[in-house]
Image: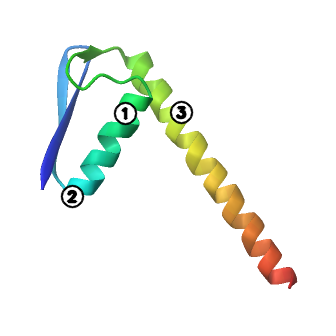
Amino acid sequence: MREIAVTVNGTRYKAKKLDEAFAEFVEEDLRAAGVYLDRDNDAERLFIAYLRLASRWYNYEKEIGEILDTIEKS
């Protein structure tokens, strides 16, 4: 189990007891979105990271719906 932390506007937030693979995934995703794990981030940076993740989720849901429609029509 691992802990990851991010600082936003001077406040440190921690997520504890994360599965190792999941923690690694989250850290990589945050870095790819431009969120720093070792220094302070402004709220806008975190919001942009959230929008990036929300966009992916939205597209996955859309794809799943299209696949289900295709299956139902078969």
- Label 1 secondary element: helix
Q: Quadrant of the N terminus?
A: bottom left
Is 51 positioned to the left or the right of 8 in the image?
Answer: right
Residue at the spot of label 3? 51
Say which quarter of the image contains residue 22: bottom left
- Label 2 secondary element: loop
How many angstroms separate mark 2 from mark 3 (CA)?
24 Å
How many angstroms separate mark 2 from mark 1 (CA)?
16 Å
Query: In this picture, is 73 found above or below 8?
Result: below
Is 72 positioned to the left or the right of 13 in the image?
Answer: right
Query: How far from the left and from the top, in percent, is residue 14?
Result: 17, 37
Residue at the spot of label 1? 30
Residue at the bottom extreme of this rendering: 74
Q: Residue at x 30, y 38 (%)?
A: 27
Query: In this picture, is 1 found above or below 30?
Result: below
Residue at the spot of label 2? 19
Residue at the right extreme of this rendering: 73
Q: Quadrant of the C terminus?
A: bottom right
How many numbered marks does the figure carry? 3
